[in-house]
Amino acid sequence: MPTAEKPAAQPDGGRANNELFRKITQGPGIVSLLGVIVALVIGGLLVAVTDKKVIETSSYIFARPSDFFSQLWRAGTESYVALFNGSIYNSARGFSPFLETLTVSTPLICAGLGVALAFRAGMFNIGAQGQIIIGATMAGYVGFAWHLPLVLHLLLVIIFGLLGGALWGGLVGLLKARTGAHEVILTIMFNYVALYLLDFLMNTTAFRRPGETNPISPILDANATFPAMPGSRLHLGFVMAIGLTVLVAWMLKRSTLGFEFRAVGHNPQAARTAGVNVARTTMLAMAFAGALAGAAGVAQVAGTEKVLTAGVAGSLGFDAITVALLGRSTPWGTFFAGLLFGAFRAGAVNMQISTGTPIDIVLVVQSLIVLFIAAPPLVKSIFGMNPKRRARVAETTKAGAK
């Protein structure tokens, strides 16, 4: 009897190419990008369904559906065009909005690196807010209380800001290493301590500006602030953020200390068996993470604000968690995530002014991004990237063909 011919085996090169293509298209970077796109689409729909003209045309959607869908498209696109014009480029201001995006992104990148580094060492650093506050407090005091030459003064502002954050983070690491206390509880409590400590200091004569009743410090000496680009708020702190990103990337990949951070993050018991001092590594990881968050405080007080106030940190420490998650705790991923969130922040005001879109929509989009980034299987399911699901579909199709 004639036997059915077996299908020709796929060459090894073809299988390798398919495997490479699958790894590229389903890698963490692509999944993160798709998660951002889904969040933007949902955010656009939320903007559209709250638009007055969309609501009006929805009353006769079945009679003239084209009116409804055209208004739906208009409302969504107008909001994102306004966001682009406020964060990247517009014809009236050129690339000035992009410079503002870089300015807003600077502290987000620094603080995000602090959270990401702790993640890589197996710890959840919710204390970036407190570390920013302490870093900004020490940097700000050196900036307005001391009077030194340009290079020396700015250098000391940066050093003391980093030391302040490192001290605040290192204390958490020390307590965790010595007592076994969980870093989440410790960092939350340290956030409150830092916040109320700054409130107290801002009402003392050493920190409050003479003649002021509001809690605001004297203006920092010109020698203690980052030089800014003429015509914009972009300052040299952005270069510091780039340098810190390069440093963290090198440390994690090339240095012994970075290897120990990653080893403890993957498996503390195995790292201890291999001879790594887990307690020391834990303390150093939190100290380095705190120093990076302290750099965000330096960027705020010596770059953007030029003064120290009780609200100098804003919500940067909590936004940094989102930035680190979006960047998947990698240095360059965190860098570009900081740029994205900086663009959202910089463009949100223009979006509200130009289209009347509530600024809270930007916060909704950011929250959706976190949701999709934190759940890669959800994104893969939306785009049919789940290999098990594809295998089941293929089996069902093959069975139906028979």
Image: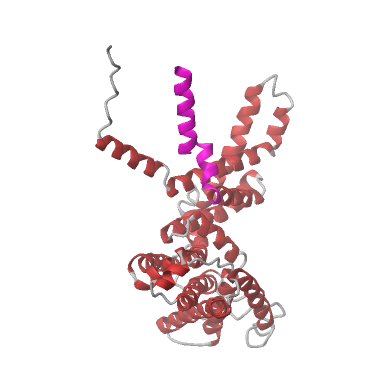
The N terminus, quarter of image? top left
Q: Residue at x 40, y 81 (%)?
A: 151
What are the residue bounds of the magenta stretch?
A: 374-402
In the depicted structure, whether residue 218 falls above or below residue 30? below
On the image, which quarter does residue 219 sit in?
bottom right
Q: Nearer the viewer, residue 13 or 56?
A: 13
Q: Residue at x 41, y 68 (%)?
A: 244
Q: Residue furthest top?
A: 1
Give the side of residue 249 with respect to residue 210, left or right. Answer: left
Q: Nearer the viewer, residue 292 or 169?
A: 169
The C terminus, quarter of image? top left
Q: Position of residue 121 (x, y in %)?
A: 47, 67
The answer to whether residue 310 shows anywhere in this view is no
Q: Main secondary structure of the magenta part?
A: helix
On the image, which quarter does residue 319 sit in?
bottom right
Decide whether residue 174 is among the magenta residues: no
The mark tally for this picture is 0
On the image, which quarter does residue 24 sit in?
top left
Q: Position of residue 189 (x, y in %)?
A: 65, 74
Q: Position of residue 310 (x, y in %)?
A: 65, 74
In the depicted structure, whether residue 18 falls above or below residue 175? above
Q: Residue furthest front?
A: 1
In the depicted structure, whether residue 216 falls above or below residue 128? below
Decide whether residue 379 is among the magenta residues: yes
